[in-house]
Amino acid sequence: MLKRRFERGAGVLCHISSLPNEYGIGSLGKEAYAFADFLEKSKIKYWQILPLVQTGYGDSPYQSVCCNSGNPYFIDLEQLRAQGLLDDEELANARMPGGRVDYGALYNARYATLRRAYARFNIREEGFVRFVESGLFDDYALFMSLKSVYGGTFRELPAAYRHKEELAISEFRKNMYKKEYCFWLFLQYEFFIQWKKLREYVNSKGIKLIGDIPLYMAADSADVWARPDMFMLDEDINPVKVAGVPPDYFSATGQLWGNPLYDWQAAERDGYSWWIERIRRAYELYDIVRMDHFRGFDRFYAVPAGAATAQVGEWLPGPGLKLFEAAERALGHLNVIAEDLGVIDEGVVDLRDRTGFPGMKIMLFAFDGNEENEYLPKNIKPNSVTYTGTHDNDTAFGFIEEMPKERFAAFVKMLRAALRQEKLSFPIVSRADAAQALVMCALGTKSDICIIPVQDVLGMDNSARMNTPAIPGGNWQFRLKDIPGRKTAAWLRKAVKESGRA
C-alpha cells in the first residue's frame, strides 16, 4: 500500500453538536463558520469531528440509523428561513435554552419544525430531483418512512417490508412518496448542501477536516435492513452474535455494544464493494478519515446474542489487509487514522504498520511510571496522532483534578521531565497549570498530528466530558457557551508555534 505522512500540525476536536447557538444543538450555521475562524486565528490545521450521522437509540453518533446519513439536527434553521422555508415566528419558536443538549425536547420539537419547512419546499426543484434520482438515500428514506408509519424497529414491520420484498416496497414508496419518502430525502438534501458550503469554507482557511467511520452499524438501521447479507444474521434478520469488547480499563464486565457483526466472508465474495462505497462517501465529507475500533479489522470480539455482559465472547478474524488493498485499488491513497486503542496485540500492530496508517497516542495514559509506556512522549514516533484524550476520556483538567495529592505530585514530576525532553518550559503551580502543561506536552511530541479536545483548550473539568463508555445515559450532551475568544486563540497560537506546528 502507498504510505504517506500527514503534514505536521495541530488540531482541535469539537463535534458539530457541541457548537453554541440558540436552537438547542450545534448546527452548520454561523457558529460553525465562526469556529473555523477561531481555528484559523489559532494556527490550527485540523478540525476533528465525530460522525455526522443521524443518531438513533441513545443519541450516540456511533449508533446511527444510516451510516452515510447527515444528522437533521445539524441543519441550520436560519438558512432555511433565508430560503423562505421558515418564517420569523417559526424560527423564534424553535429557540431552546442554552446549555447541554436535551435530546428528548429536541426530538419532540425539531422534526415538527423541519416538516413545516418541507411543506413549503418544491420537490420538483431541479437539484432535488437529481438528488432523488441518484438513489443514494433510497434505502434511508424508505427505512425512515416505514418507521414513521409503523413505529418500532424494522424487525417489527410486516414481513414483506421487513424482508424488503420488491413489489411491496415499490408500492409503499409510491403511496408515501410525498408525505414521508421525500421528506426524509429533503433532510439529507439540505444537510449536504449546508455541509458542502461549510467544508469549502473550512478548507479555504487551510484547515483539513477529520471525520469518523464507526466500525459497526446499529442493529436497527437502514444498513442492516437493506443489506442483511453483509451481517451475521439468522433467517429472521436477528443477530447471531453481537459486537463488544472484553473487560478492560473502562469496564470490569467489558462493553456490550450489541451491534450486528459483519460476515467478512460474504464481504470478500462481494469484492468489498459495500465497504468501498462507504469509504468513498466518507471522503466526500472529510479530508481524513479516522477508522474507529481499528482492531476489529484484524480480529473482532463476538458475544453470543442475548448475553447480559461482554465477559463471555470469542475473537474471530477480520478482513485484514485485503479490505484496505481493495479500497486503495478502487479509490487511490487512503488518508486514514487508525483508532488502535483498547485491547491491542501483535496482529493489530502488524496490520497498522502494513497499511502505514498512523495510530493514536493518549497523554492521559502516559504517566504511569513505566518508562516503556508507548504513550510516554519520548516513546512516540512521528507517524502517529497524539491526543490529550479522546471523546471517551476525562478532560485533562478533570483527570488531574481527581488525582490524590501524592499521585498529583508524582504526575507533575514526570510531566516536567517530559517537557524538558521536548525542550519546552511551562510553570506548573496549580492543577489547572498541569492541565495546560499536558496540552503543551502533547503538542511537543514527534507525532505528525496532535489533536486537542476543545474542552482541554479551554481547561474545562469533567462536567464537560463528552462520553463515558459503558454508561447508557447523559452522554453526547456537551456544548460550548460561546465560540472561544481572542485570548484563547492567542494562547493556543503561541503554544502551536512553540511546538513547531504552525
Image: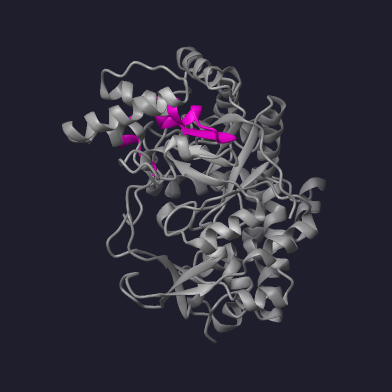
Residue 449 lies in the magenta stretch: yes
Structure colour scheme: one colour
Residue 477 lies in the magenta stretch: no
Which residue occupies 73% across, 75% down?
270
Q: Is residue 7 left or right of residue 463?
A: right
- Residue 457 appearing in the image: no
Q: Is residue 147 left or right of residue 205?
A: left
Q: Which residues are magenta?
A: 440-466
Residue 133 picture location, percent across and down: 79, 58
- Quarter assignment of residue 146: bottom right
Quadrant (top left, top right, bottom left, bottom right) of the C terminus: top right
Which residue occupies 68% across, 35% down?
199
- Quarter assignment of residue 286: top right
Residue 90 picture location, percent across and down: 52, 35
| 275 up-or-down from 114: above or below | below
Residue 342 picture location, percent across and down: 42, 56
Residue 4 picture location, percent across and down: 71, 43
Which residue occupies 73% across, 60% down?
327
Outermost bottom residue: 235
Q: How many marks?
A: 0
- Residue 343 appearing in the image: yes
| 225 up-or-down from 416: above or below | below
Which is more toward the observer, 381 or 458? 381
Quadrant (top left, top right, bottom left, bottom right) of the N terminus: bottom right
Which is more toward the observer, 318 or 29? 318
Outermost left residue: 405
